[in-house]
Amino acid sequence: MNFAELRFWELLVGALAVIFGLRALLRNPPVWFDKTALLLLGLFLLWSVSGITFVIFLLVAVLSYVGLKWILIFHGRAPRRYLFVMIPLQLLPLLFFKYGDFFLHTVLHLEFATARTWLQGAAGRDIPALRDLVIPVGISFYTFQKVAFVVDTIGFKQPLPRFLDYMNFAGFFPQIVAGPIERRRDLLPQMECFRFAFTKENIDEGTRWVVLGLFFKCALADNLAAQLNDASVANAYQIWLANLLFGLRIYYDFAGYSFIAVGLARCLGIRLTLNFASPYLATSATEFWRRWHITLSQWFRDYLYIPLGGGRVRWWVANIALVFVISGLWHGAGWGFILWGGMHGTFLVINRLLGKRIPIPRLAGWILTTTAVFLAWLCFYESRPNVLLAKLHSLITPAAYKLELASHTFDGCKNKPLFSLVLCALVFLAEWSSLTFRGEAYHYLRRPAMLFVMVVLIVFLSPERNNGFIYFAF
């Protein structure tokens, strides 16, 4: 669901008009009507994204529920052992669509051209190669949410909810394709008592988040994406500029989606987890991961890091390394993502080893953390391994920092890129003020005067060509 497309809002408003028209005819509709309408609304919007996304979501969601019910009914005395079967089955579609080509062709160097040709002849039609398969939108997000649901239900001995309530938990449309990754204890109780009730308070608060999210996406992220130039390999200044533009773009893009999701849910009376809390204000690697993609960080902490022993065991370094390598792979199938995860794992290990022994002033901590984070973004957007290594080499080579290269980079950054960076700096100042003086992320950015300015900027700065949300690819 692309919140930045007019088509999404047309479909949403049209579907809600039908729902409220039926509610008016029923006058006092039963609870099951609202719950069923919410589920059908979510499935309809998901189908509008793509048929394969719709089918794979239903497969994972229904498999999780049916499998969990089978475990609880027939093996309720010792259900935990069956998690070793259930979880791999839940992950199977994700592994196939997202990682099949990478592991078979890139890691194992296997080719199946002969087998594919035979299958095409037997089927009488073309069979796509693994590399040509379309990854269902949001599969990484909703798969992790279903895995957590199964583990929480069995681990905490929770009752199995009604299928309708579970499906609304699994397919709540604002957050299904790009998070936040909600937990059973937070979202399911809200679905069990859901009613359509648009209150003035909910609409006011929800609209503020929607406007902030659209501003982040349309006025900031999309313009930054248009200005990203990652062609240079030998100019360190140009590489750092590309890292900066991409790092800002991915933040405003992903946080923008998350804010719109929070706002839409709030208008419906549902509270979602805030997935970002001004991460570029972090003064340590640990703090960064408490502010960036919060629900994913918590997922890895609770379902992988702590079960492995966390930081209380002698092999805690290996635990951190494993968690962040898997985190890198979660974002994408490629060596660059693995390197990105390894770099962040290294940052956290250094943070833990030196953080308590060497006191670092907050300003110095912020500079070091921000530099490390934007350095690692290079591994995220550069998908060619040989070019990635060449760029990393340039960043540590003194010759790549010649003054004439700096002049060349500055000449190419005078007009629109400079304006976007100035606007981002003003937003950064508002974020810093919100946390420093109000103790609440994005407080000043959600004030009426600021929201009015944002609406004006959205109108004037939104590019003609709409970009999809960047995390749809993950």
Image (cartoon, rainbow, N blue to C red):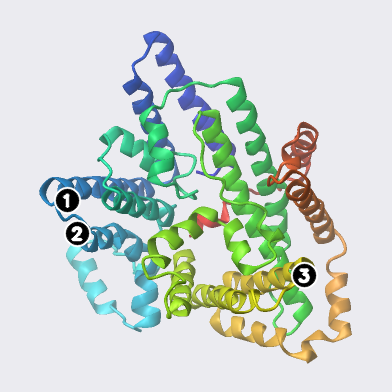
Horizontal and vertical percent for residue 199?
56, 21
Where is mark 1, residue-wise? Answer: 71
Task: Say whether disc 2 or disc 1 marks the residue closer to the N-terminus.
Answer: 1
- Look at the image and tell me whether residue 464 can be seen: no
Where is mark 3, residue-wise? Answer: 361
Query: What is the distance, in whole Å, between disc 3 and disc 2 at their CAs?
Result: 49 Å
* For discs 1 and 3, the disc positioned in front in the rendered view: 3
Horizontal and vertical percent for residue 379?
58, 74
Q: Residue at x 53, y 37 (%)?
A: 8
Q: Amino acid at mark 1?
A: Ile
Where is mark 2, residue-wise? Answer: 82
Q: Amino acid at mark 2?
A: Tyr
Q: Pointer 1 and pointer 3: residues touching (CB < 8 Å)? A: no
Q: Nearer the viewer, residue 383 or 69?
A: 69
* For discs 3 and 2, the disc positioned in front in the rendered view: 3
Q: As drawn, which residue projects farthest toward the left?
A: 74
Horizontal side of 155 relative to 209 (left or right) equals left
Q: Residue at x 49, y 75 (%)?
A: 338
Q: Amino acid at mark 3?
A: Pro
Horizontal side of 425 relative to 269 (left or right) equals right
Give residue 288's quadrant in the image: bottom right
Q: Could you tell me which secondary element the residue under label 1 belongs to?
A: helix
Q: Pointer 3 and pointer 2: residues touching (CB < 8 Å)? A: no
Query: What is the distance, in whole Å, between disc 2 and disc 1 at their CAs?
Result: 7 Å
Horizontal and vertical percent for residue 175?
48, 44
Q: Could you tell me which secondary element the residue under label 2 belongs to?
A: helix
Q: Residue at x 72, y 76 (%)?
A: 239
